[in-house]
Amino acid sequence: MVKKKTVKKTVETLTHNDATRKNIPTAEFQSVMEKELQTPVKVSYPRGNTGLDEEKQSRNPDLDPQLIWRGKDQQDWSDLVVDAPPLFIQEKVHPKVLIDDLVTKGVDEPYRMFTSRAEYRILLRQDNADERLTELGASLGLAGSDRISLLKSKRKLSLKFIDFMKQQSIAPDEINPFLEKVGTSPLKQKMKLIELAKRPQVRLMDLIEEIPGLEAIKNECGSRAEEIVETAEISIKYEGYIVRERMMADKIKRLEKIKLDTEFDYERLKSLSTEARQKLRKIKPGTIGQATRISGVSPSDISVLLIYMGR
């Protein structure tokens, strides 16, 4: 029997001569936080309320040894610990908006830190700063439990005003003298209090004095009555604008998840305007959301980008 000749097999070594990688973070990933704040925080989730307790008590290691072999039994007893990096959301924190402005809008002239340049001017208001930032501050150890308690009390009483007015109607003969006094048209039939409060001529504080039920809620507010009434009034009068801007903010959030190649050649997309191609090539946005904030990039240019990406 003739032996077959053995042929040694060799593995070819592949070299990638052009394998270069540019690892330059784009604007939205460049952090302005101190190094110690960038480190993820260890967050522990107890497993005690997961329904595993009874099952774990009934386990017999002799009958089910793989629990011991794989370390699963010990894993189930321990808490779930995960890394939680700090997140700063644009419509909650002004500095993030201002930094993004400097990157996307440029500094051809002296930059003035106007909050009116923020995308969400109705959401970023002075009167709701505590609602936007107190819980975030508490998570970073900057606000105590007393501040959280005050915030919860404010929210509860403000919603109590709104819920009462949504449920209660008032007859023309009960409210028309007040309406005529403040210079707005009288009622011809019953109307919900919430609709009256939306009229620009009707101040909520004045309306409260005419309605015993609202007066009782105001008394619960104590020394913070003016602050809480103002919060409720803004929520009522500007509800439509606030809801619309919230929808717009949610849309922008979705666009932030659509990534763009920072090395993409925008000159290939002839459907983009000349100014848009120049700005996109210069700034190199990392997401569609950032591209929408570049001056000179119109909504039609964004549509072209979305079409190109198959969205």
Image (tube, helix red, strand yellow):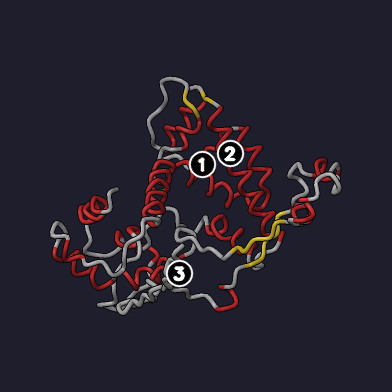
Earlier in the chain: of badge 1 and badge 2, it is 2
* Residue occupied by mark 2: 161
Earlier in the chain: of badge 3 and badge 2, it is 3
For label 3, the crowd category at 10 Å Cα-Cα, with few meaning under 14, some 14 to 19 and many 20 or more, is some
Most extreme residue toward the top is: 189
Residue contact at pointers 1 and 2, CB within 8 angstroms:
yes
Label 3 or label 1, whichever lies nearer to me, is 3
**x, y percentage for residue 93?**
49, 64
Which residue: 82% across, 41% down? Answer: 54
The numbered dot on residue 175 is none
For label 2, the crowd category at 10 Å Cα-Cα, with few meaning under 14, some 14 to 19 and many 20 or more, is many
- Above or below, 311 relative to 120: above
Label 3 or label 2, whichever lies nearer to me, is 3
Residue 183 visible in this rendered orientation of the protein = yes
- Above or below, 33 relative to 221: below
Identify which residue, 156 or 212, lies in the foreground. Answer: 156
For label 1, the crowd category at 10 Å Cα-Cα, with few meaning under 14, some 14 to 19 and many 20 or more, is many
Please, what secondary structure does the residue beneath circle 3 have?
Answer: helix
* Residue occupied by mark 1: 204
Q: Quadrant for residue 205, please give it.
A: top right
Q: Say left or right for 225 vs 117.
A: right
At label 3, the amino acid type is Pro
Earlier in the chain: of badge 3 and badge 1, it is 3
At label 2, the amino acid type is Phe
* Residue occupied by mark 3: 95
- Mark 3–mark 1 Cα distance, whole angstroms, equals 33 Å
Please, what secondary structure does the residue beneath circle 2 have?
Answer: helix
Please, what secondary structure does the residue beneath circle 1 have?
Answer: helix
